[in-house]
Amino acid sequence: MYKDFYKPENYVNRELSWIDFNGRVLGEATDVNNPLLERANFLGITQSNVDEFFMVRVASLHKLAAANVTTTDASGLTPQEQLDAVNAKEHRMVEERYTVYNQQIIPELAKQGINILHVKDLDDKQYEFIRRYFNDELMPVLTPMADDSSRPFPFISNNSLNIAVQLRRDPAQRAMSMKTKEILEGDQEVERHQNEPHDDSKEADIKFATVRVPEIYKRLVRLPGENNFILIDDLIKEFLSLLFPGYQIIKTATYRVMRDMDLDVAEEDTSDLLRAVKHQLREREHGQVMRLEVEHDIDPWLEDQLIDNLHVTERSLYRVDGPVDLTFLKKLSGMVDGHDDLRYKPFKPYLNPALDMDHNIFQSIRKKDYLVQHPYDNFDAVVNFIHQAALDPEVLAIKMTLYRVSGNSPIIKYLGMAAQRGKQVTVLVEVKARFDEQNNVRWAQRLERMGCHVIYGLVGLKTHCKVALVIRRDEDGLRRYMHLGTGNYNDVTAHFYTDMGLFTCDHELGIDMTNLFNMLSGFARPPYFHQLRVSPDGIREFINKKIDEQIEVAKSGGSALIRMKMNSLSDKQIIARLYDAAANGVKIQLLVRGITCLRNDLLELHDNIEVHSIVGRFLEHSRIYYFKSNGNEEIYLASADMMTRNLNRRVEELYPVKQADTKARAIQIFNIMWKDNTKARILEGDHYERIDRGDAAPFNSQEYFVEEAEKMNKQELHQHKNQRHFTSVFETLSKHVPSLHLNNEKGDADE
């Protein structure tokens, strides 16, 4: 029975597993087989990953611990115990990140003539450049903020870069201010001290101030000379004295805070949801500090000032041996001139001609289903689907869910175009999509202005499914055309997220999609779905049923296989059911990119669970659920991971891939990823190790798919050239037809 596995020792803590995942990303920064600028980018990604982790996950633990919640997670840890373990582990990870930065990335960049310099390293020309840059560009924008009796410690906003300053009044200036002068009081001249804007004569000699680094400027400032840069905070620190005339600068230090940025909307009525989200966006900027990052050599006095005023504990203080906030490394590649050999080789994704703008997409989908895998298949196929729906006079309605879209989304544009052309357009915009709330609120309001009907989500649930439904009047009646995806309708992230999607006009799936949208927009409660499985509850019940079926096959002596690919595996019940299946002889193969709360070293599992994790050039985001027993194969794609929030608290979709060629392709995609022995790691108990491939040839699944896309493009180009050749031959003959001398017109007509 699966509940027999409900023991803390059978589970890995979710938060600690996430830190391990970020460690695998850091492993890509140390992999010398990756291009150097891409390695720098991976290091920057580890920083942005952990920033979000603290703003959300650690913030949640803080709130639970503060409320004295003592219930434990699946691994048996209380919120306070998790908080302590997370901070202890992350302190070690910080040391690892900066070791990579100082001992690998920076020296290897320098060997390639790419330098991130300090002020002491600059030549005269470069120093004169930063002096002018400070005076002309930065000085007018910077604002020094004092902390004294009349000016309280300023608010330090989340994720902003700041410079703490220790300073004292210049003795000569102070002496001058103490002298008495004859001044006019009323109609008499008297001797007294001249009033100053701020009299600090009775205050402590050592003072504190802070300067915020303006975000409108790039963190890396390009210097004279090819590919030479300096950090803007180093530049500002060099000339800080110009901001404090009359004072001596004693010490400076860069620092940054991460605050609680989790959106906690009390949803009682969806009519107020948009207003509530807007309010929370304002409120969360003032959330409690979760982490304070400072330079490792910060002056103790400055450190104490920050600790006292920002109310952080020693546990939440992170001293870093290098620049505070390494996310600037994500921008480095785009700023470096030349050095294409230090970047990934660009490639052109494949676009099936049947899904381009020169063909009628609806006629193509009516003939057969199409399975696409981004970024290897061009995301333009999805954009074209919505674009043609907006233009097609036979299209009556478009219904779509949007979780995250780009800042300049063409899909938004075409949905608005469709509404303005008189089509019924209904869009569910999830305004609670984490860190995209502000963007989504803006898009939702714009869609409304363009004439679309906008739904803001459901009470207590996030709508995370990725579906689009187009209703079209065909020659033989109304028909539903659909796109169902595993990832967001975001044309930017589609270039580096691996996701899968299905174009189909399957009748039963179309009915299910109609019922789903009726549920999202109205009071519909469909009694069942034909082929679509919908969370909350529906996907969990379906996966549980499929696992139980495999167990029964294995118990009866048949061969049973479960294969799953997902971002995270953390749901206690699903893990226990997989344990139960393995204990009963079901072979289980899992591809899990991130959090993995399952451990596969339990004796009861009989080595029946193998888990791989692929971290590479592209972020593995697709979800695949595959079941095979006694020769029967079923494969499903989904928007949902096997996480409790996806199964219980979100609207998600899971759908079958049934057509013979698309089904075979989906299975092949999993097979190819399972063969990866270069970017894949293998789970050993509760942690991942690189795969020991022995004498086997290295195989990188992402590179394989890139090469496959390039081959398809070459084939398409070759076919296109052949078609042009034949067309031009035909056209050349046609041009000469009028000049042919034919004896009888009848014969000409018969031709």
Image (tube, rainbow, N blue to C red):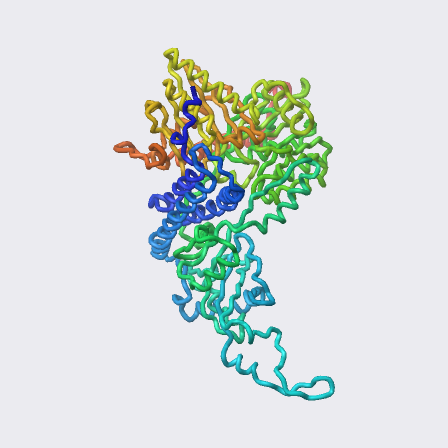
Q: Position of residue 95 (x, y in %)?
A: 37, 51
Q: Is residue 247 visible?
A: yes
Residue 393 horizontal side relative to residue 140, left or right: right
Task: Residue 701: name its quadrant.
Answer: top left
Residue in the image at 28% along x and 32% along y = 696
How many numbered circles are shown? 0
Q: Is residue 625 placed above or below 384 in the rendered structure?
A: above
Residue 721 visible? no
Nearer to us in this view, 282 or 124: 282
The residue lying toward the viewer, choosing from 323 and 476, is 323
Task: Give x and y (percent) for residue 15.
Answer: 45, 39
Task: Look at 53% across and 65% down and name the residue there.
Answer: 209
For the point 65% across and 46% down, which residue is it? 279
Rendered position, 641 above or below 56? above
In this picture, residue 67 sits left or right of residue 224: right
Figure quadrant of the N terminus: top left
**Residue 157 rendering spot, x and y as whole percentages:** 56, 54
Say above or below: 570 vs 443: above
